[in-house]
Image (tube, rainbow, N blue to C red):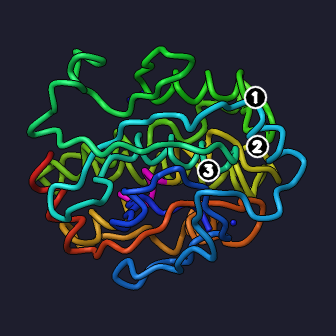
Amino acid sequence: MSASGLTAAVFSVSSSLVASAKCRGQCGFLRKPELLALKPLRSFRKTLISPSRKDTVAMALISKPLEVCVKASTTTPNTIGDCPFCQRILLTLEEKHLPYDMKLIDLAKKPDWFLKINPEGKVPVLNLEDQWISDSDVIAQLLEEKYPEPSLATPPEKASVGSKIFSTFISFLKSKDPNDGTEQELLKELGSFNDYIKENGPFVNGKGLSAADLSLAPKLYHLEIVLGYYKKWSVPESLPYVQSYMKKEELSMQTTIPISKGRLEMACEWLHSK
């Protein structure tokens, strides 16, 4: 479970956006943050501006915005929290130009209506054809099947590329023993990804953005911020293709989520929730 500038992982939404979250963003890739003060959206509006044919087709398939429940920040009111799985689904909705109604869920105090539609209480969940769907993998697949344009399909043989990076990142983050091998395991996975992108990039599926990138990008960004803060660790220069993948901007991705949360704020949220 549960690019353009590879997509940053902490997606912060302004109060006005939350209040009227029938949204679509228009911007290029986000640049590498300086305390996460990232490039703002050129436009983030309830209606489409000069929609392309694909945008029009996608909009025509939807009678109302898709409802999506995501984690609320534990440190900042009216902002999305530190969940790369929720961020993945928001990015997917944005990249497919689908209007959505975002609902921020306080996971420490889940509202009754949320538990009624989703007894497990996990996020993200998406309302698709009056059915609430959980698990980011399932949601992304169903969105691809129902709204195939623009395609984000990842060939099966490439779907697992980079899939072990996040788990090895978590192990290294939690480790208190510098000699337990967790850092080496993370470097091994990042090294494999570096070699893959060198031969097959710039994205997982070659020249085009795919669902695999939208899944991996937020996780890599969390890795960069959290390990940088807690362990003073960063992706080494010996892995230039990983670094490039994380920094790419203004390539094929035309939409993303606005970000304004600071590094310390994000790190504190991880401390409180992990």
Q: Secondary structure at mark 2?
A: loop
Q: Secondary structure at mark 1?
A: loop
Q: Which mark is residue 94?
A: 3
Q: Which residue is mark 2?
A: 205
- Marks 1/2 in contact by CB < 8 Å: the verdict is yes
In depth, the one of 191 and 210 nearer the eye is: 210
Q: Is residue 103 left or right of residue 148?
A: left
Residue 216: percent from left, percent from top: 52, 47
- Majority secondary structure in the magenta region: helix
Please report whichever mark, 3 or 1, sits nearer to the chain's N-terminal start. 3
Residue lying at 43% horizontally and 58% vertically, measured from the top left: 9
Q: Disc 3 residue type?
A: Glu
Residue lying at 28% horizontally and 53% vertically, measured from the top left: 81
Q: Which mark is residue 155?
A: 1
Residue lying at 50% horizontally and 36% vertically, measured from the top left: 163
Packing grade of label 3 (10 A; few <14, some 14-19, many >=20) is many
Q: Nearer the viewer, mark 3 or mark 1?
A: 3
Please report whichever mark, 1 or 2, sits nearer to the chain's N-terminal start. 1
Q: Disc 2 residue type?
A: Asn
The magenta-colored residue range is: 218-222
Residue 246: percent from left, percent from top: 56, 65
Image quarter in which the N terminus is found: top left
User: Is residue 182 a member of the stretch shown in magenta?
Assistant: no
Packing grade of label 2 (10 A; few <14, some 14-19, many >=20) is many
Residue 229: percent from left, percent from top: 22, 71
In depth, the one of 68 and 11 nearer the eye is: 68
Gap in Å between the C-alphas at discs 1 and 2? 8 Å
Q: Disc 1 residue type?
A: Pro
